[in-house]
Structures are given as structure tokens and as C-alpha cells.
């Protein structure tokens, strides 16, 4: 396990809106990534055995799902797994008896959904901090990281989600065509470290059946739009790269290389 890689997590939650909040929260971070989400305790155990996440978030009730959080925790305790994930529970139940029971089932932390400040950010922060403090050797018989437990398609989606999150932070508009080209170029450069930005732009042009100059102009337009509409302090903080003195914005190649390098270090 490489603690510099995103922490792979499993969410067992039957509220679709809550799942979306957790997914969006993780997508805006570099230290977490979900390898599965389900509203079924049985399916959660299957995902756990197949994907071996380091962290598991369990909703205790699962009123609209299948089984219950308690069933998952009991089944997990009885399972012969090499991996012992860090498990946290979320619940609307406020009962010392229930809390004592789940702690007996090797739960590291219990979150009341009614407590002040509760939300995905708090839960993910706690898991990441527990990851740093709990020796991995006590939780797993194998040394595995995120790349060994996700499919190529899941990895592609994770990288694309990360790129989208980064582009949104600097105001790259989703309404403009250049955003799509920019995302594709960054992705190609991330997965092919020896590629030059010009080469990936040609690839993007080929994929979209347009010419090279059209791709460059569209990317330049979305960058200029972001620099015109976004707060300059935010831009300097989120994207501290060279600004072309003639245009007042980063060049497409500078921008693509910066984000490809930035994202490659976190996957």
C-alpha cells in the first residue's frame, strides 16, 4: 500500500443523494477514490472481497436497500479476509447500546448524521487520518494499492473525474467545446508520460475529426474565458504556471502539461 496514492474506499449507503455527495466530495480530492457504492449489505461484502478497499463507510439502517449495516459488519467479522479495512459507520440512530455493539464489530468510528458538521468531508477526512495512524500491516496480509484493484475502465473514469474537478476549480466552462478537447488532451498526456502536448492535440483532433488548429483555438478560448471570468487570486493559487505576455493567459501547451503532471502525481 502506497499512502501517497488515493485511499480506495467502499460506500454502503441506500440514499442516492448521499451517494452523490460522497462521490462529488471524493472527486474534488486527491487522497480518496471510491471503488464501489451499493445499497446492499451482501453486495457490499462482495465488492469488499473483490476490490479490497482500505476504507469502508457503512450506513447502519439501509431502509431502502437490502440487508443492514449490522448484517454487513457481522458478515465482515466472520469473513476470513487478508484485508482488514478501516470501517466507519454513519447512522441516524442515537443509542449507546447500538454504538457499543458496532464498536464490538471492529468499527473504528461512528458518525451520527444529526451531529453538527456531519457530511462527506468530515467522514473522508477521518478515514484518511485513520489511514495515516493505523499500521497497514495490522489490516492486510498483502501490499496492494489502488491500481491493483480497479479495472482499466474504472481507472480511466477516475482520471477523467479528477481532470474535471481540476478544470472546474479554475472556471473552465463546461458549456464550451474546448473543455472536452482540453480534458481529452490532459488525459492522453497523463497515461502516456513520454507524449508531447502537440502529439496529444493531434490525437484529440483525430478522435474528433477536426483539424489541429481548430482544437488549439477551442482550447485557447476556454482558457481565456476562465481567466476573464475567474478570481485572479484563485487562478494564481490553483494554477500557478507561466502566463504568456502576449495573451495574458497560459498557453494551451503550458496548461495541458501542468495539469497532466499534477494529476499524474496523484493517481
Image (spheres, rainbow, N blue to C red):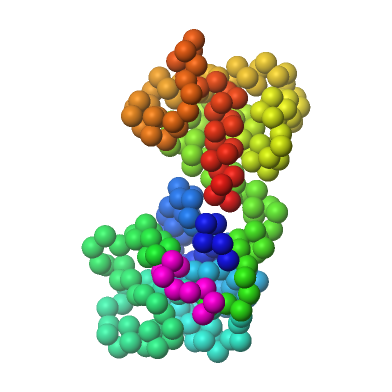
Q: Does the magenta stretch include residue 206?
A: no
Q: Give the range drawn in magenta.
A: 130-138
Q: In this view, does 72 lie to the left or right of 238?
A: right
Q: Which residue is farthest left?
A: 116
Q: In this view, does 87 lie to the left or right of 207?
A: left
Against 29, residue 137 (above or below) is below
The image quarter containing residue 107 is bottom left
The answer to whether residue 68 is visible is: yes
- Of residue 103 and residue 191, the one placed in the foreground of this image is 191
Q: Residue at x 45, y 15 (%)?
A: 248
Q: Residue at x 30, y 62 (%)?
A: 118
- Of residue 74 and residue 137, the one placed in the foreground of this image is 137
Q: Which residue is farthest top?
A: 246
Residue 139 x %, y %: 53, 78
Against 3, residue 260 (above or below) is above
Residue 98 x %, y %: 33, 85
Residue 153 x %, y %: 68, 52
Which secondary structure is most common in the magenta stretch? Answer: helix
The answer to whether residue 184 is visible is: no
Number of numbered discs overlaid on the protein picture = 0
Q: Which residue is drawn at 61% across and 86% down?
A: 80
Residue 92 x %, y %: 32, 72
Quadrant (top left, top right, bottom left, bottom right) of the N terminus: bottom right
Against 85, residue 176 (above or below) is above
Against 246, residue 26 (above or below) is below
Q: Which residue is drawn at 42% across and 35% down?
A: 238
Q: Is residue 137 magenta?
A: yes
Amino acid at each position: 500500500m502506497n499512502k501517497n496514492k488515493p485511499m480506495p474506499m467502499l460506500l454502503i449507503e441506500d440514499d442516492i443523494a448521499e451517494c452523490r455527495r460522497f462521490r462529488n466530495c471524493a472527486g474534488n480530492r486527491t487522497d480518496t477514490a471510491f471503488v464501489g457504492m451499493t445499497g446492499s449489505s451482501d453486495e457490499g461484502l462482495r465488492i469488499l472481497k473483490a476490490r479490497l478497499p482500505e476504507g469502508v463507510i457503512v450506513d447502519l439502517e439501509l431502509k431502502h436497500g437490502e440487508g443492514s449495516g449490522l448484517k454487513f459488519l457481522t458478515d465482515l467479522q466472520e469473513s476470513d479476509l487478508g484485508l482488514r479495512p478501516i470501517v466507519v459507520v454513519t447512522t441516524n440512530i442515537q443509542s449507546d447500546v447500538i454504538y457499543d455493539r458496532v464498536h464490538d464489530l471492529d468499527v473504528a468510528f461512528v458518525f451520527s448524521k444529526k451531529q453538527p458538521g456531519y457530511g462527506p468531508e468530515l467522514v473522508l477526512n477521518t478515514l484518511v487520518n485513520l489511514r495515516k495512524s493505523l499500521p497497514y500491516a495490522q489490516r492486510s496480509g498483502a501490499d496492494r494499492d489502488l491500481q491493483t484493484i480497479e479495472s482499466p475502465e474504472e481507472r480511466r473514469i477516475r482520471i477523467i473525474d479528477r481532470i474535471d474537478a481540476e478544470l472546474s476549480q479554475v472556471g473552465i466552462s463546461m458549456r464550451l467545446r474546448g473543455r472536452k478537447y482540453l480534458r481529452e488532451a490532459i488525459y492522453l498526456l497523463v497515461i502516456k508520460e513520454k507524449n508531447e502536448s502537440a502529439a496529444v492535440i493531434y490525437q484529440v483532433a483525430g478522435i474528433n475529426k477536426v483539424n489541429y488548429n481548430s482544437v488549439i483555438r477551442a482550447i485557447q478560448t476556454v482558457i481565456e474565458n476562465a481567466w476573464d471570468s475567474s478570481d485572479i487570486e484563485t487562478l494564481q493559487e490553483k494554477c500557478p504556471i507561466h502566463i504568456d505576455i502576449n495573451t495574458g493567459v497560459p498557453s494551451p501547451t503550458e496548461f495541458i502539461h501542468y495539469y497532466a503532471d499534477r494529476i499524474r502525481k496523484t493517481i
